[in-house]
Amino acid sequence: MQYKPSTVAALIGGVISVSFAAIFIRMSTAPPLIISFYRMFFATVLILTYSTFRSEVFSELKKLTRKDFILLLLAGFFLAVHFGFWVTSLSHTSVASSVVLVTTQPIFIVLIESVFLGKKPSKNFLIGLSIAAVGSFLIGFGDFHGSEFALIGDVLALLGAAMAAGYFLIGGEVRSRIKVVPYILTVYGFSSIFLLLFTTAAGIPLFNYSAYNFSLFLLLAIVPTLLGHTAFNWLLSEVKASMVGVTILGEPIGSSILAIIFFDEFPSYWVISGGLFVLLSIFFLWRQELLEGKI
């Protein structure tokens, strides 16, 4: 199958954009919750500004039922906790380890569906899960021998992946009924509120940060959030969802290359070998879902 130039550009641009997330986060000297809050806050403000010129966005929001509103609230909560865990993980472990482990979210999605939604895992799922488990073990084993501090980061990245899975599962039901812009406006807005509450509860100041940090917050909102995730959302109307999912697997590769360029941070052999297992498992599961006609 041949894709239009615009589709190929969106595929490549989306991967490059989201790959910068870990780099901007590592560059910032602000606390993880502050980074997460301003990323979502600035993204929400930019989307809201755009929406003022598009009346249909607010028309879509008026159609939301009480159930939709509650689901979007929960989706925003899971997204906020996801960023809290993942951004914090980058302060403990390498960019490569963190990004590889946080991309295990498709595994958690299927796992949650099987445990809580009564969808029994297939033989192929168990095979894919086993491959992912081997990869995660290799990364964790290597980091444990290198630093107990790094192992904590690995666990936080995995928790971030689990929270992202909850976000996608809960928000996906509403996403099928409303368009992309009103959906992300609402979810990002709720996520900002929760992150603000988390930050306030932790007693972290909101404004004592340099212009350098605020520029990174804005870049996080624009590049990986609005450009990257918007590209993937747009692609859903151009290619199969499975292809979009496989494309996102390029993020760990992109982030690792950028980490070498910006931080001279080369992934260890444990991370490289474990990362290959994790990416192989997710690719295997997406391929099986496609072959079985589920996506």
Image (cartoon, rainbow, N blue to C red):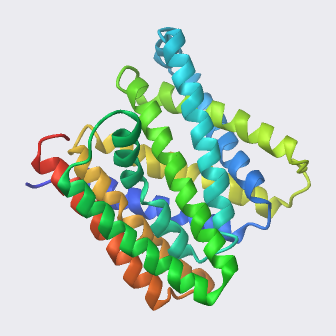
**Screen quadrant of the N terminus:** bottom left
Q: Position of residue 140 (x, y in %)?
A: 52, 77
- State the residue at coordinates (34%, 77%): 276
**Residue lying farthest to the left in this orientation:** 1
Q: Nearer the viewer, residue 16 or 243?
A: 243
Q: Position of residue 107 (x, y in %)?
A: 37, 54
How many numbered badges does the structure rendering display?
Answer: 0
Q: Which of 14 and 53 is in front in this view?
A: 14
User: In the picture provided, is 200 more to the left or to the right than 295?
Assistant: right
- State the residue at coordinates (46%, 31%): 171
Q: Where is residue 3 in the image (x, y as percent from the top left)?
A: 16, 53
Picture layout, residue 153 above or below residue 36? below
**Screen quadrant of the C terminus:** top left
- The image quarter containing residue 28 is bottom right
Q: Which of 136 and 195 is in front in this view?
A: 136
Picture layout, residue 32 above or below residue 203? below
Q: Position of residue 197 (x, y in %)?
A: 79, 37
Picture layout, residue 49 above or below residue 56? below
- State the residue at coordinates (52%, 74%): 97
- State the residue at coordinates (45%, 47%): 229
User: In the picture provided, is 189 more to the left or to the right than 260?
Assistant: right
User: In the picture provided, is 235 more to the left or to the right than 37?
Assistant: left
**Residue 205 visible, this angle:** yes
**Residue 223 visible, this angle:** no
